[in-house]
Image (tube, rainbow, N blue to C red):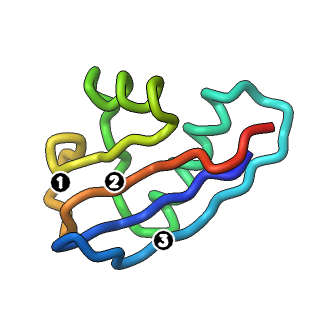
Amino acid sequence: MRIWFKIFKNNRLKRDTVIENTNDDTRTHKIFQALDQVCYEFDLGKPIWLDATINEFKRFSKARFYQDNFIEEIPFDYLEIHVIEED
């Protein structure tokens, strides 16, 4: 599984990375592990999965985490997660 994480500020891509996970975990575990890894890499607190975020991710395999998803202040508009390749 490959997941693309992107940080946007003022409709511009500021930072991105692709996390690849090839272990035999479930899809959900792979997504959470990749999110943990990218939060460490980008030095971010973990975002909260709100109902709207979960529904968006289920429908499109893509979701955006806005300020409402984070406890602390974030220096960007949103973090986008996008599954680009499934196992």
Residue at point 23%, 41% (across, down):
69
| Structural crowding at the residue carrying mark 2, measured as other residues with C-alpha within 10 Å and reported as few (<14), some (14–19) or many (≥20) | some
The numbered mark at residue 72 is: 1
Vertical side of 5 occupied by 53: above or below: above
User: Label 3 vs label 1: CA separation?
Assistant: 20 Å
The amino acid at mark 3 is Asp
Disc 1 secondary structure class: loop
Q: Position of residue 32 (x, y in %)?
A: 55, 38
Q: Are marks 1 and 2 in contact (CB under 8 Å)?
A: yes
Query: Which residue is denoted by mark 3 in the rendering?
Result: 16
Q: Position of residue 70 (x, y in %)?
A: 23, 46
Disc 2 residue type (three-letter): Gly
Vertical side of 32 occupied by 58: above or below: above
Q: Earlier in the sequence, mark 1 or mark 2?
A: 2
Q: Quadrant of residue 4?
A: bottom right
Q: Is residue 47 left or right of residue 57?
A: left
Q: Position of residue 15 (x, y in %)?
A: 42, 76
Point out which mark residue 45 bears. Answer: 2
Q: Residues within 10 Å of mark 3 (few under 14, many from 20)?
A: some
Task: Locate residue 5, reporting x and y percent.
Answer: 49, 59
